[in-house]
Image: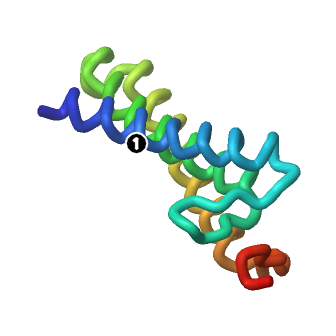
Amino acid sequence: MDLILAVVVAAANLAVAAVLLARSRGGTAVPRIFGRPQPYPRLRAAMHVCLGLGMGAGWLVKDVFPPHSRGDAVLFDVTRILLAAGLFAALLVVSRPARPVPDKAAR
């Protein structure tokens, strides 16, 4: 069950990052997902990549190394750094004021 959950978490976060970058044309436009504008698409994509790799991939490979080994400690530190980077990116997205997006449907 852990393996399935880890794969789903990693794949879902990486898919959201790919959709954000694809719809924003590499970060130059503000994409709309579920009808809502998503400002700062590159920052949001970086957040989802960090969270996907930190939670999903970290969860997947945690059983590769024996407990309390050097590999296990390195993996734990890398996962912690990725999750902290994802949290920092999420806080940046929330704290930055969004640029006004012209709504073409309202005209």
Where's residue 107, x and y in %? 80, 83
Farthest residue, direction right: 28
Viewer-nearest residue: 65 or 34: 34
Where's residue 43, x and y in %? 72, 55
Other-residue count near label 1 (Cα within 10 Å), few / some / many at <14 / 14–19 / ≥20: many
Disc 1 secondary structure class: helix
- Quarter occupied by the N terminus: top left
Residue in view at x 83 percent, y 77 percent: 102
Residue in view at x 43 percent, y 19 percent: 71
Farthest residue, direction front: 107
Q: Quadrant of residue 21?
A: top right
User: Is 27 placed above or below 68 here?
Assistant: below
User: Is 6 placed above or below 45 here?
Assistant: above
**Residue annotated with mark 1:** 55
Q: Quadrant of residue 25?
A: top right
User: Is 106 placed above or below 35 here?
Assistant: below
- Give the side of residue 59 with respect to residue 31, left or right: left
